[in-house]
Amino acid sequence: MTDARTDSDVLVVGAGPVGLTAALELRRRGIDVTVVDRSAEPMQYAKAVGVQPRTLEIWDTMGVVRPALDAATPFRGQLMFVDGEPAGRIDLSLPDDVPYRFVALPQNETERVLRQALADHGTVVHRGVELTGFTHDDTGVVATLRDGSGASSPFTARYLVGCDGAHSTVRKGLGLEFEGDAFPEEYMLADVEVDWSLPEGYAVRSTRQENGAVTDLLVCIPLPGTGRYRMSMLAADDLLVGARSGEIAHGLESSRRPELGHIQAVLDRLAPEPVRARNMRWSSVFRISHRIAAHYGSGRIFLAGDAAHIHPPTGAQGMNTGIQDAYNLGWKLALAVRDRAADGLLDSYDAERRPVGAEVVGRTVRAARSGIGAGEQDAATVIAREAQLLVGYPGSPIVDTSGSDGRAPAPGERAPDATGLRQDSVARDLRVHELFRHTGHTVLLWAPTEPALAATSELAARLIERFGEWMRVYTLVPSELPAPACGRVLRDSLGSFARGYHLDGTAAVVVRPDGYVGSRAQDPDFDTLEAYLDRILRA
């Protein structure tokens, strides 16, 4: 269908956080990307706010964590009130080996940070450009794009990524079912300031209940700025147009905007202490659906973010899950564009990410009704799950468990961080996650003895010779072991790497470009590692 020349390697539809992440991951790998968005201007309000620690780890690798943190505010936990009385407190504490904490960052700021990083790689968003249709086959995609003047033109690409939201044109064009349902309630959102004595950095959830059922609700999420919150609550009666008409929609409703008086009325009923709202920046009515696409793509076309899954905003899971969709897809798609992806690599996107989306949909629906972690006993597990640190791909077709000894992190799990690494040419201690700041695989070799060091040095040399462009290899040794002054040899001065990765004898841990363990083996040999990597990279 497409000729040898295409307009772009990849067309990304939608310039929200998910589309920008997908485009940035491709551009970091030198792939030609075109991004279009039908909105003439970027979003100017705080639609999605919470940013999870796992997303910050991803942004660290992508090189955007510093500007994101500069614009964010700490998100420390949640205060709960029922019928006007304190009903509990959640502190979002995490182990020291997790490098980042929870933050609140308005979505418009998230998009600004990602958009600037994308521009630094030479790509700008084409705004006021709408995808109206497409055709595709096994050679590429021909999209029809309509600009602000109403003129339409064809656009050819090798691949298309639909990050175009809950009403995705890409998903509909593929004819994919979007299975699920909608909450009957409608809600109001508002960005306002309040003066109260509650501690900074904590969300507030206040409810009225009858016979254990929630009958009235106020949720306040902290935003950057003194006393500023994004508040959500049940919509006032005079705004319930959708409920009366039977309309089922998802997302923000631009035609109905609550006024400050609507927000104040809810605060008068539910705020933990008397308070006045002021300085409202924006407001909207919204409806919650929970749906998931039957597949995350077809052929050379993929879905990510709200185009693939929508769910309640509880726990700030939506945007973060979508960003991780794009992060998972980006490195695989880049290899495909370069004709270096092994057979089945792109199929692993749906195999890995759709189960994650289904779990998030189910969990956030339960949490919207009963609160985060309701009925669970282990608070640490609840927080780690909300931080998206427990997301994994244990059953993935591109994860190798054959050499695993059952120790954590197992293949398919997030590669944990560790501190106290020493490198001869660096004055300060390093973290393991700093070694992941590149676009390929990372092989971590553990050499606890001098014979092991000799063996792993030879193994490292062979891996670099075979896969050098696509990976980095590091050998880590105990602090007491004499080691050559080599840039690829680091000392585990605090023992935190060996403890965190549960290592004793000689071992290899292969970490994928998205920060997940792809393979681990005791007494590793070149043939075994090569066989695994050949499942990812085509020679």
Image: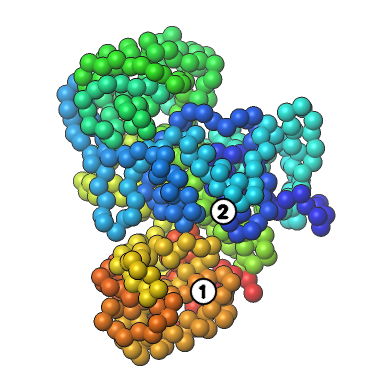
308 or 420, which lies in front? 420
Evaluate if marks 2 and 1 touch, with contact meaning CB atoms under 8 Å apart: no
Residue at numbered disc 1:
532
* Residue at 52% from the left image edge and 80% from the top image edge: 463
User: Quarter of the image holding residue 313?
Assistant: top left
Res 83 visible: no
| Residue 518 against residue 301 in the figure, above or below | below
User: How is this picture coloured?
Assistant: rainbow
Image coordinates for residue 110, horizontal then vertical, percent: 48, 40
10 Å crowding of disc 1: few (<14), some (14-19), many (20+): some
Q: Please count the marks in the image.
A: 2
Position above or below: 230 against 57 = above
Circle 2 sits on which residue?
A: 25
Q: Judge the density around disc 2: few (<14), some (14-19), many (≥20) Cα neighbours within 10 Å.
A: many
The secondary element bearing badge 2 is classed as helix
Q: Amino acid at mark 1?
A: Tyr
2 vs 1, front mark: 2
Q: Percent position (x, y) of residue 236?
A: 39, 13
282 w.r.t. 355: above or below = above
Question: Alpha-carbon distance for marks 2 and 1?
Answer: 23 Å
Q: Earlier in the sequence, mark 2 or mark 1?
A: 2
